[in-house]
Image (cartoon, rainbow, N blue to C red):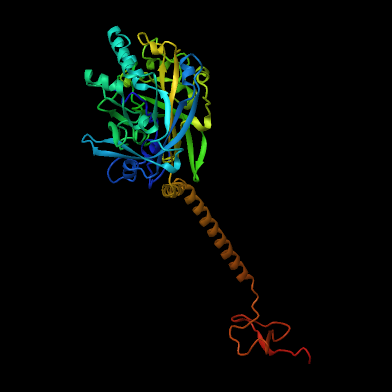
Amino acid sequence: MFAQNTCHLHLLICPVRHGCCVIRDLPTTSNNYKPTEIVLVEGSRVFESWKRPPPPVYMEFFFFNVTNLNEFLQGAKPQVQQVGPYTYREYRYKDNVSMLETGGMVSAYNTKSFVFLREKSVGDPAVDSITTVNIPAWAVMNTVKDSFWKSSAVSIWMNSLGVTVFTTRTVDELLWGYEDPLLARVAPTNPSVEKIFGLMYKKNGSNDGEFIYHTGEQNYMDYGRVETWKGQSELTFWTSNQSNSINGSDGSAFHPLLSKEERIYIFTPDLCRSIYMEFEKDVEVKGIPAYRFTPPRSVLASKEENPANEGFCISPKECLGTGLLKVSPCRKGAPVVASFPHFYLAEDKYVNAIEGMSPQRTHHQTFLDLNPTTGVIVRANKRAQVNILINRISGFPKTRGLNEMIFPVMFLNESVVIDDASAARVHKLLLIVTLVSNFPLIIVGLGAIMLAVLIILLVRARKQKNEVKRIVFTKPLYATSTEDDTSYSPVSDKEKEDPQNGTYIGLTPKADPQA
């Protein structure tokens, strides 16, 4: 029941979602060219790296530990301390990949697993404890709050079991699951309820269901675009067709020839919706040029700021402010609210309600750095926060002293940077692309050089021909002695003309200058 009442918010990302798909070759990148090599089919240059991305992905978890619980329950402002990171190496690959007979599409399951990295963590998750919201208790209370008899029964169970609205658990328990006493009591009465709860329960070695992707064969702009998820071409969680649309890729692949003016759409099952990103600035990663795309404030804006988001309101009374998204419809009614870490890009009232919140762009922004020529992800950070909506609930005295607020539980930072081997391939590719795209200029340049060489040769040949005509011959055609012994002069001062043979030239001994 509540194993999935949390928001493991996979906003991204090729690397972050499935790693970085490195394109090994590309014939050309002219804007009029459709890259036929960038297709998701067996034998293409991107298929293997799409299925098993090479760069390492890291998942960091940060928890908010409540430091003044008793005072808070009596009406004081809650104080939290950030604890983390607890870092895991994330392995992602696409499983059960098969080409559809209709052509142009491929189906796959996105499988992921996690391995703890002690050297990159602040402590031992099996030992470190966190005091936080008792998510199973709040989920159960919200489920039965409209029934007097059910809420009364659950309240009695909570008292008898000693269940409170806050709990202290180890990091391991909060992430990977523990048997909750209240869920164990509820489970026999409802087959859909599981007695194990964890923020990442059943997320290790599992998948999000079947995806069907466009291969990009028919149109390279459709490369990696999601056609259906779990057999659905649109969602059923929200109140408008636009909100229920499945748009863009799953974050693992993006079409080549990106433009700064376009929006990048990503569908993420854990957010139960599609989001978009916009160009922010030019960046460079390991010498590779990239465009940085980030989700703007309008993505999670209130319906007043962005009327297009009205479809994400569960009801007119359950429409949260800017910076938040209530994902209860796809979390079996649990009061789970998604945001960026420390309520980054959210209204100030959510930040000010909790002592210890400090939103910073550098540490809490989600972004994608994409090479515009190839669409390859060279760096990415997906940062998302899990919160619980807490308030007074009729029939539950334990909530009597609480005011309505969005209470932070934890946030994650899923990151990737292209590895050196993949970066070298991209560099080689971009060099080839540069040469190919500049091929007409190279041809024109070579032609100009050859023309210049030809002109120079012609000028030299003409000059030599003119010089030959100006030579005064002072040597006979046949000489029998060296230049030092003889000279050539007319026989007499007046040269004799022969009508048939021309002028007579006589050979005389060379005069000695010292004589």
> Can you name the residue that lies furthest to the right here?
514
Residue 56 located left or right of residue 446: left
In the rendered image, the vertical position of residue 162 relative to residue 88, given as above or below: above
Q: Residue at x 47, y 30 (%)?
A: 294
> Can you name the residue that lies furthest to the top here?
148
In the rendered image, the vertical position of residue 234 relative to residue 477, given as above or below: above
- The one nearer the camera, 54 or 253, is 54
In the rendered image, the vertical position of residue 36 relative to residue 267, given as above or below: below
Q: Is residue 464 visible?
A: yes
In the rendered image, the vertical position of residue 275 relative to residue 393, given as above or below: below
- The one nearer the camera, 417 or 371, is 417
- In the figure, residue 62 lies in which quadrant? top left
Q: Residue 434, how many percent across, how many down?
A: 46, 47
> Can you name the residue that lies furthest to the bottom here?
515
Q: Residue 278, how many percent across, how many down?
A: 46, 29
- The one nearer the camera, 499 or 450, is 450
Q: Residue at x 55, y 56 (%)?
A: 452
Q: Is residue 385 visible?
A: no
Residue 132 located left or right of residue 194: right
- The one nearer the camera, 42 or 96, is 96
Q: Residue at x 69, y 89 (%)?
A: 508
Q: Residue 195, how many percent across, how many down?
A: 27, 25
Q: Residue 190, how many percent across, how many down?
A: 23, 18
- In the figure, residue 57 lies in which quadrant? top left
Q: How many marks?
A: 0
Looking at the rendered image, the quarter that the N terminus falls into is top left
Looking at the rendered image, the quarter that the C terminus falls into is bottom right
